[in-house]
Image: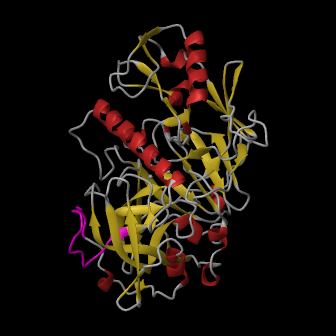
Amino acid sequence: MTAIFNSFSGFFLLAFFCFIPLIVLNCPIAAQTSGSGGGGSGFTAELVHRDSPLSPLYNPSTNKLNRLSNSFHRSFSRASHFKQALKSSIDGIQSQIVAASGEYIMKLSIGTPPVPLFGIADTGSDLTWTQCKPCPRCFKQNSPYFDPKHSSTYKELSCQSQFCEILGEDDPSTCTNNGTICEYSMSYGDNSFSVGHLAAETFTFGSSTPGQAILIPDMVFGCGHDDEGTFNETATGIVGLGGGKLSFISQLSDSIHGKFSYCLPLDSSDSNLTTKLIFGDNAVVSGAGVISTPITKKSPDTFYYLTLEGIEVGNKSLTYKRPSKTNLVDSADEPDQGNIIIDSGTTLTFLPSELYEKLESELKKVIQGKLTSDPLGFLSLCYSNIDITKLPTITVKFTGADLELPPSITFIQNGDGPVCLAFVPTNDTSIFGNLSQMNFLIGYDLVKSVISFKPTDCTSATSGN
């Protein structure tokens, strides 16, 4: 599922989306309320880890080792397709992930009357889409397909609509039925795809007032009529939380004041824990211990880019120097701006190989333990018979923000098996993954173009502050 930025024109969207009214109704809610007191505003959606027993994707026949292996596979696949997105041109609208590769499931409802859906929350994707009737060639899903004919608020968008023009910036052939209906085509790196009509519909979420729901009319999404590939049958589509013009976040930017936040609890894949994705003023991260780093604007604008300057182990500082380039005007001692993507849908953290090698070398000096191999074959620094709580803190140094990561989130252990560093080297796209984000309240302020981190017990956190 993702994070991350560059072009912010989508956050000052088209005239009729400069303000999207939030209509509060007394009715059953499809998303949890935020439980936040005070006078803030906003709404929340519940997030469930895909491997949690509460998830519709949960497979009780797998053990923790299987789940870790699958999660690591998804991380490497996701990194591979981020590489494609950053280095190659895109034909049509392309989602740079393996289908259904995100780690968190988001609950929401769509239509009038509202129909509950489970979408993969993805900060590495823009267009939100779900399977719709009629669906002559669609992947199997356990819940019924959304039927637009049964919704009083469904509207297909024409080729002349401004959002169809946004689609046309990448794919000029977006119209069907003699140029009357706007069509989207979304392809994935594993040859999965979704094709359908661009439409507007009412989405339903929870509010910060218990017992109420927030209806957001005229949300633009993809109504898929031709979808195939490696999608999981318990999810119904993708919730695009990236930075592109068609993303859920961009469409709501003015209404939520460009703010959203989440807090990922430890061990959420092995428990009944859920968390909240909070939108609006309640998502502001403030108080003691908050640090912030700028979001860098780069292309493609789907992703949220941060600048990694180095890493610290104990008192040892490991500076990241960008690779030398011929005819480079500025110094190679300075890191490239926006050199790492923060993504909620990737489990592992991918570091530049040169920096990773420094980190591994330093950890070997300070950790007194017996080296061993990773039984899954993914991770290169592992120890046997070692107390994970006694391992050193790793500080990730972003521009203006030194983020101290305790060993509980930088190292991973399967039962009584070896303890392994949950970082891997890469010569391509660097990614700050979700294991490294756990037990931090992380707030995105897209007006100020900053991401903020606050150490938080996310198991008990229920509000955005």
**Residue farthest to the right?**
330
Which secondary structure class fits the magenta region best? loop
Q: Which residues are magenta?
A: 130-144
Image spot of residue 452 (x, y percent)? 67, 47
| Quadrant in the rendering for residue 154 | bottom left
Residue 405 visible in the displayed image: yes
Residue 217 visible in the displayed image: no
- The residue that appears at 41% across and 47% down in the rendered structure is 103
Relative to 438, is 162 above or below? below
Relative to 383, is 85 above or below? below
Relative to 25, is 462 above or below? above
Image spot of residue 247 (x, y percent)? 52, 66
Image spot of residue 260 (x, y percent)? 60, 58
| Magenta residue check for 443 | no
Image spot of residue 250 (x, y percent)? 58, 67
40 or 283, which lies in front?
283
| Quadrant in the rendering for residue 14 | bottom right
Relative to 374, is 119 above or below? below
- The residue that appears at 35% across and 34% down in the rendered structure is 68
- The residue that appears at 58% across and 46% down in the rendered structure is 341
Instruction: Give left or right: position of 122 versus 440.
Output: left
